[in-house]
Structure formats: C-alpha cells, structure tokens
Amino acid sequence: MTGLRLPLLGGLALAALLFSTIARAEGLNAEPRKAEAPKVEAPKPEAAKAEAPKPDAPPRAEFEAKFTYCKTCHGVAGQGFRGAYPMPRLAGQQPEYLQNQLEAFIERRRVNPVMFNVAHVLRPGMLTALAEGFRDLNPKPLGGEPRELIPAGKKIFEEGVPAANVPPCASCHGADAKGAGAMPRLAGQLYDYTTRKLTNWSKERGQDPAKPDSSQIMEPITHGLTPQQVSEVAAYLGSLE
C-alpha cells in the first residue's frame, strides 16, 4: 500500500503544479483591468449660475445696513412716505430702472442734492443689490389720492390724449402699470410724488444732453398734459396695486 500511495501523491502534486503554471501564464497574457472612475454627475448650468456669487456683491451685513438706511426715507416696506416732501415708493420697482436712476443721480443727469449725496458713495455692486432688494417688496399702496379723479386718469392711462399727441401710458408701462426693464413701475406710486415729478420733469431729468436716457421719452409727454390731466393720471396710478 505504501508503494502505491507515493506514486499517487506524486501525481497529484504534479497536476497541481501544472494547473498553477497554466493559471499564471493566462494571468500574464491577460490585459490588466482598468479601474473604473467613479461617476460624478456634472452640475446643471442653472444651478451653477445660481450659486455663483455676483461680481462686486456687497457682504450681506453691509447690504442690510444700507437697505435699512434707504427705508428711513422710503418707508419700512419701500411703500413711500409723506413728510415735508413726498418720498417715492420703491417697492416692486424694476431693478434696471432703479439702478439707472441711481446712476443718473451720481452723474448729475437727474437733479436731487440729497440723492446725489446718498448714491455717489455706493459701489456698482451695492447699486445692483439695492435695486434687486426693492423689487422683491410688495406692500399695499399708501393711498391718499383724490378718488374722484381716478376714472379720468384711467382713461388717460389706457387711451392717452390723442389731441395732444400723448400716447397711452400703458403702451410703455404695461397694462398693469408695473413696467418692464428700463420702463418703471408706476402702480402704487404716491399721488403727490407723481404730480410733482410730471410737473417738474424738465427741471430734474435729462440734465446732460450728452448722455440721454429713457427719461427723454417723457419730455414731450409731460409738456402735452395739462395740470388737471397730470393730477388725474397720478390719482389713478396711486390707486393701483
């Protein structure tokens, strides 16, 4: 039995050796397996754009301080304020228009000594941030306009005054008077503020002919309206939400 076992063990050892040799040979000849890189989902362009900080954006605390400062004159919700002089509503205003006007104060294209002092120290990033901040406010109109003038003002807003070549206000400011882009929101603006601005337009706006802006469009319109018509359209605008 001993003699038979030895050859059997030898045969098994030889088979194992052959199997190991073949396996190693196959392993050497096989192409190495490339490690698969982990799949990383690319961020969506919209998300990346939303998360990217805006150039020259002011620190949050600095913006909040300046935003609150503006509200000391323009109302706690940007709804406007009546004091010695009517302070305009800024709430819901078109950012492009509001930024344009701040720049007009800085460049003295629009005359207002108080607003020049306020605006000329603001960096471009702060101008943008403030304009966008007021856009997002939406308080009720302050009211106080003569209600009896509203129907006539609505007619001027929607139809204009053809005899005086005054186009409908809605053609630029929108049917809801909320403006778009460089055209300002007029809905909810204080009656007495609108009356003053339309009456004194040529004395305050477009003061640098070398740098005309969208206010130039209003020049012939303000001259085409009578004082009564100015009061009427101002009353209608003050009643809108």
Image: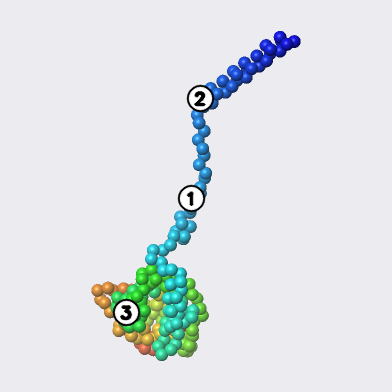
| Residue 175 in view in this figure | no
Residue denoted by label 3: 110
Q: Is residue 22 shown above or below 155?
A: above
Residue 33, given in percent of the width and then of the height, sits at: 52, 33
Residue 3 vertical placement versus 24 (above, below):
above
Q: Secondary structure at mark 1?
A: loop
Residue marked by disc 2: 29
Q: Earlier in the sequence, mark 1 or mark 2?
A: 2
- Say which quarter of the image contains residue 149: bottom left
Q: Secondary structure at mark 2?
A: helix
Which residue is at a point 47% across and 82% down the rendered structure image? Answer: 75
What residue type is disc 3 on? Answer: Arg
Q: Do labels 3 and 1 touch, CB within 8 Å? A: no
- Nearer the observer, 232 or 31: 31
- Which badge, 2 or 3, comes first in the chain's sequence? 2
Farthest top residue in view: 3
CA gap between label 1 and label 2 equals: 37 Å
Residue 26 screen position, x and y as percent: 54, 24
Give the residue drawn at x 44%, y 87%: 82
* Number of the label disc, if any, that sits on residue 42: 1
The image position of residue 229, as x and y in percent, is: 39, 86
Which one is in front, 178 or 74?
Answer: 74
Q: What amino acid is found at the position of numbered circle 2 in the picture?
A: Asn
The one nearer the camera, 112 or 30, is 30
Q: Residue at x 69, y 12 (%)?
A: 6
Lower position in the chain sequence, tag 3 or tag 1: 1
Q: CA distance from mark 2 to mark 3?
A: 83 Å
In depth, the one of 235 and 16 nearer the eye is: 16
Color encoding of the figure:
rainbow
- Residue shown at 24%/74% (left/top)? 210
The residue carrying pointer 3 sits among few (fewer than 14), some (14 to 19) or many (20 or more) residues within 10 Å by Cα, namely many
